[in-house]
Image (cartoon, rainbow, N blue to C red):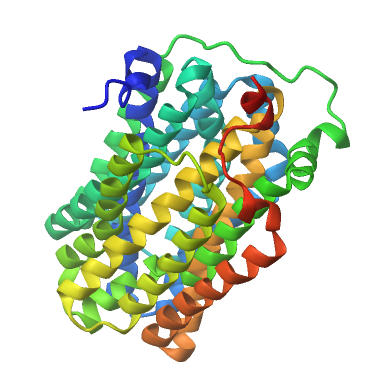
Amino acid sequence: MAPDRFSAFRHSSFARYFGARFLTAMATQITSVAVGWQIYDETGNAALLGWIGLVQFLPAVMLVLFTGLASDRFGRRLIMGLSILMEMSCAAMIFYLAISRQFDPILVLVVLTIFGVARAFLTPASSSLVVNVVPKENFANAIGWITSSWQLASIFGPVAGGLLYGISGPTAYAAAAIIFMIAAVLIFSIPRPEQALEKSATSLETLLGGFSYIWKQKIVLGAISLDLFAVLLGGAVALMPIYAKDILELGPTGLGLLRAAPGIGAVMMIGWLTTFPVKDHAGIILFVSVALFGLATAIFGVSTTAWLSILALMLVGAFDMISVYIREILLQLWTPDKVRGRVNAVNSIFLGASNELGEFRAGFMAAAYGAVLTVAGGGVAAMGVAATWAKIFPSLRKARYLEAPEDLAG
């Protein structure tokens, strides 16, 4: 075992931060699986699965000028903790709707909109906080592990969500609320970290600081926009209830297995990446991994066999993890601390568009053209995105190292 593989965990603040991010992601997954299954089971309406993604994405877009600035100005630990508490409250509200038999899709979507507001503030704060809880020499190791926290949650969360929903919907929502509460306690237990706070008067320039920085850094722009369009077109998560119930006939427990499969593949890949990190030809590796992500998605889309579908989803997660790993290291190591929250707020819009807006697209396309054509066609489109971006962002394609130029010079 490489002696430095777990170097970031030697810092107690990072260990608590990692635990909080993992638990928050796990509770989110439990909520997502349970809500998606219950709404589709009770209505049979695939379009509602798309609305679940849209209402969680729109707050991030509408508040992007303020969410990142809040973490840069008021402190990332505080914003992260308060956001998790708001998510806990939303899970508790859905629990109440379920247990009181008032689980109306419109009411649930309203609660999920509030949940989306919490996530809009949480994402830039949590993404930026990592570099404030570890020394600079442990940045890459810490970011590598943080990118895996969501994937670890993607393994345990969906399985737990399926099993808990098998007991009852309220059980799943209550468990999610408790997990959110534990995550908030972990965050507030972290000693207040040092942070370069934004103290200048609020102006249009400070509000748009994240957009300005990303636009100037073409390698960063290319990396995050590549992920945006590849996952926007190739994402299949929203339609997994359809595959689990109608195509593969696996039931709610099987839905949990399908949702967990990409996480299993991603964790296996992060184990490889933390042992053998990307040291050269980062750009080429990024584009190849995105193309293979699209191919694996297309295979899942046309598969009618459970084992092949699960294997394809594991490959989806593995290749996506390579992309996430490279993108997150580029983003965090190339961004000054003073503007990091705003840059991550903009990045959260790209991520939200690729995930929640991708779910919206998938849900409505599936309602019109069917799930198989939607997923398989999206995988092929993701391969096309990889080829196109390799041409229009030559600096990213030719990039060999992940460190910022000043770090290489040093």
Q: Position of residue 230 (x, y in %)?
A: 53, 66
Question: For the point 58% across and 33% down, which residue is it?
Answer: 403
Horizontal side of 284 relative to 168 (left or right) equals: right
Query: Is residue 235 in view from this perspective?
Result: no
Horizontal side of 398 relative to 133 (left or right) equals: right
Horizontal side of 371 relative to 100 (left or right) equals: right
- The quarter of the displayed image where residue 18 is located: top left
Please say if 410 is above or below 122.
Answer: above
Q: Position of residue 379 (x, y in %)?
A: 45, 75
Question: For the point 35% across and 71% down, which residue is it?
Answer: 296
Query: Is residue 16 in view from this perspective?
Result: yes
Please say if 406 is above or below 265.
Answer: above
Question: For the point 41% across and 65% down, which residue is it?
Answer: 293
- The quarter of the displayed image where residue 26 is located: top left
Q: Position of residue 165 (x, y in %)?
A: 19, 57
Which one is nearer the viewer's eye here, 245 or 154? 154
Tell me the quadrant of the picture where the C terminus can be found. top right
Q: Position of residue 3 (x, y in %)?
A: 27, 20
Question: For the point 31% across and 39% down, which residue is it?
Answer: 177
Which one is nearer the viewer's eye here, 79 or 324? 324
Horizontal side of 176 relative to 122 (left or right) equals: left
Which one is nearer the viewer's eye here, 269 or 39? 269
Total marks shown come to 0
Most extreme residue toward the bottom is: 369
